[in-house]
Image (cartoon, helix red, strand yellow):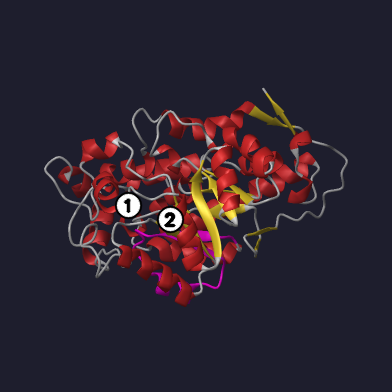
Amino acid sequence: MRLTDCHNIDDFRRLAKARLPWPVFDYIDGAADDEQTRIRNTAAYGDVDLVPDVLAGVAEIDTSCTIMGRRSALPLMLSPTALQRVFHWQGERAVARAAEKFGVWFGISSLATVSIEEIAALTKGPKLFQLYVHKDKGLNRSMIERCQAAKFDAIALTVDTIVSGKRERCLRSGFTSPPRFTPNSALSYAIKPRWALDYVLREKFSLPHLDGHVSEGTGKAVSIQEYFNTMLDQSMDWDTAASIRQEWGGTFCLKGVMSAADARRAVEIGADAIMISNHGGRQLDGSRAPFDQLAEIVDAVGGAIEIICDGGIRRGTHVLKALATGATAASGGRLYLYALAAAGQAGVERALTILSEEIVRAMKLMGVHSVGELNRERLRRR
């Protein structure tokens, strides 16, 4: 299978699976416990149908929108994800360049493998930094100050990782950051020589936002589950979030909100946006899909705060269903991580091309001239 054989996100998933060692693929693909929530995140979009109009004169349409003060060519964001240079040696650099080319938002993680400063120098496109609150207060302060100096457009505080979900695929494979070659996984790395040579011979793996503060994740191999459970601050509360918003002083988003009550609290502390997200099903298995919660949250706080529906996006029609329900935009991680793992920057660009074409095609077939015309009259629940 080649990159040109990829015509949808599932195709990129198959190509990534063919090219990655199985512990690395399972880290991207896997989720918590029985993975019911991961599956539901995408399946939820199938429970709602689009209602098209015809004879609308759609020779010209506008797919752009404004997200957190920056114009985006598409109502789609590339969510921040960790450890990207493990998946492909180009890592966050590939995603940043592709996002700028397509005029869309993207984010980098606290556990990114390329620094805040390098990403800022690499792209003028809209970008956010995803913040994990660590027990090490100096580390938290350092990351915020570096984002301020680098003029990042927004910070997204992740609020759903107070402890780690049980990622059973990673427990079975022994996946760690950095990857640790064990008897159980050695063969899987050995039979993927292209990945292994890139990992061993190219730039040394590091997590530059942690350097100088903690050794875990760079100098000391740990599982993500162990990292979350030992390094992150489990005392984080609403006062913490409000304090970080004030310390940052710029556009502020809460990532991981899933209830209407929490959405109202986000408005109260002055957040500019929320990402309705369950961390791709990697935390609380059995929780609702973001799309299933979207209408309730829009009805509770719609208009008071921007609402980004995060997770499960595999098609352009999924994006349109989220917007018709009331979201400002949609976002996802796996939708571009599979493509990154499959083919680096070329893969991410092809994935964005496909999703952009699907959004344009679906808008024309629905008789919609701009994303602002999408509303619940365009939807019917099964």
Q: State how far apart marks 2 and 1 are (Cα).
A: 10 Å
Q: Nearer the viewer, mark 2 or mark 1?
A: 2
Report the side of 74 relative to 163 (left or right).
right
Residue visible at 46% across and 61% down in the picture: 243
User: Nearest the camera: 139 or 39?
Assistant: 139
| Disc 2 secondary structure class | helix
The x, y position of residue 278, in whole percent, is: 46, 40
Compared with residue 164, is residue 43 higher up or lower down, i.e. above or below? above
Residue visible at 36% across and 64% down in the picture: 140
* Sequence-first disc among 2 and 1: 1
The x, y position of residue 369, in whole percent, is: 80, 50
Report the side of 102 relative to 29 (left or right).
right
Residue type at mark 2? Answer: Thr
Provide the residue designation for mark 1.
Answer: 233
Report the side of 145 relative to 188 (left or right).
right
Q: Magenta part of the protein: which range? A: 104-128
Residue visible at 54% across and 42% down in the picture: 262
Provide the residue designation for mark 2.
Answer: 240
Q: Using the rendered image of the protein, determine whether residue 233 is visible from the camera's viewpoint.
A: yes
User: If the image is split into quadrants, where does the N terminus sit?
Assistant: top left
The answer to whether marks 2 and 1 mark residues whose Cβ atoms lie closer than 8 Å is yes
Residue type at mark 1? Answer: Asp
